[in-house]
Amino acid sequence: MKITQVFKKFPRAFWVANTMELFERWAWYGLFAVLALYLTNSTDEGALGFTHIQKGNIMSIVTGILYLLPIVTGALADRIGYRKILIIAYIILGSGYYAMGEVTSYNMVFFTFLWVAIGAALFKPVISATITKTTDDTTSSIGFGIFYMMVNIGGFLGPVFSSRLREDYGWKIVFLMASSAIAVNLLLVIFFFKEPDREKSTDSLRATIKNSLKNIWTALSDIKLTLFLLIMVGFWTMFNQLFYTLPNYVDQWVNTRMIYDAIANISPYIAESVGTKEGLIAPEMFTVLDSGFIILFQIIVSTLVMRLKPLNGIIAGIIVTIIGIGLSFATGNGFYVVLGVFIFALGEMASSPKFTEYVGKIAPKGKEALYMGTSFLPVALGNYLTGFLSGNLYQAWSDKLSLLQIEIAKRGIEIQEISETFTQNDYYQKAGELIGMNQQQLTDFLYATYNPSKIWIVFSSIGVLTVICLYLYDKFIIGKPLQA
């Protein structure tokens, strides 16, 4: 069948769902890519000045809950209806994004972000189910390819726009942008979305949720599935460092001026477009490269790994991501971060599709959908564990402010505590004056003295452990390699 014929077979609901996915990802990643910076940077920059432990708690617990809730929200959608659930989801998301930009206390930021997560959890299963119900055996491959492309286009455009907007207009505009993207989706679902045919449930809401939980438990009684999902928690814990930790690491330790200057030598206009007023590259521009590389190279990578058995593809992909994540954190050189993110993206492109394929292969016939419904569980637990690494560990090993405070204490220097009237930036400035260094010299000294880059060893080791466990799982649990 020609590609043009395939495109004609997609109903309007398919295209509307894909468009809504693009704008929802635009909103989510537009905020999430800069959230670590917003939570921890100095208050005189418009950020909140939280500790990295607080940041880790907010991002990991809430995002972990987001990936657990579809167990229930998917059942709600089947019971109540896709269109109604989408309208509710967009009202929650739009109000939540706006409210996040208006609150500043730890508890209120946590609550409003949790409110956003509830909206996202309502949205996720509906859009995936809509794509499933508007494709068939002849169109599903291309249909889900389009869907995955929309995810990454939204994941690319959101951070690019939020980076430029926050640089020009401050932090609040990021939340307004996210809320506006959701407003577009609300209009789309009200005026253009026609709900696809679905089997309407006659069970009570309580019975529907109970059956969903029972089905998940039934799937997890398969030891092969449960062990595989537990092992993959390691991958997601390592993977999440790209969004939870890398923005802070780049902001505090990486020399991005060299990249700005290199771009400016080619095109001053492009340098100004992607850079800051200080002649630097914004930290979130490094994480957005992941989506950009996926958009450019996913088809090529998928073609290269197509013949690999699913588990072999997963292992190969994770090995590549280990190299990428390690290189991203191993130095203070911006060019190595770019190379690290590129290598990481190649590994992600190889492993992620094979993960989905593998879960489908170990599922008994007729239980494919049930097994696929468990695939978000390692994502949820991985997000939760990420909080400790990005919070407690980073603050102890790699946080510039914490290391500077240790150095100040060693030297017996007294500097007032950070407060509403004495910000992080004030502390850096005062410390530099008392030690006799400018800010770049101070950063270089702390980097050489305390080696904050050593955190890469932990991140990469988690990936290595995951690969070892997958190899042992294949050898002793599966017994013999699955056929592709």
Image (spheres, rainbow, N blue to C red):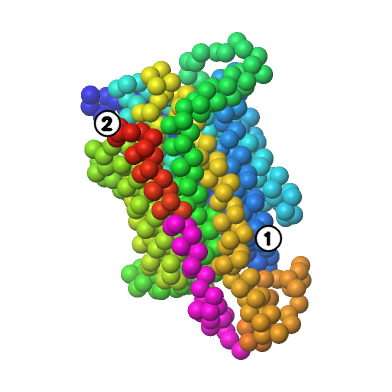
In what quadrant of the picture does the N terminus appear?
top left
Query: Could you say where residue 302 lies in the image, as x and y percent from the top left?
Result: 29, 41
Q: How many numbered badges does the structure rendering display?
A: 2
Front-most of 30 and 51?
A: 51
Q: Residue at x 69, y 48 (%)?
A: 110
Q: Residue at x 61, y 50 (%)?
A: 59
SS class of the residue under badge 1? loop
Question: Which kind of residue does numbered mark 2 sit on?
Answer: Gln
Above-or-below relation of 401 to 456? below
Q: Residues in magenta?
A: 436-461
Whether the magenta-drawn stretch holds residue 438 is answered as yes
**The disc label shown at residue 50, or none:** 1
Q: Main secondary structure of the magenta part?
A: helix
For disc 2, the neighbor class at 10 Å (few under 14, some 14 to 19, many from 20) is few
Whether the magenta-drawn stretch holds residue 348 is answered as no
Residue closest to the far front: 476
Above-or-below relation of 226 to 319? above
Front-most of 182 and 410?
A: 410
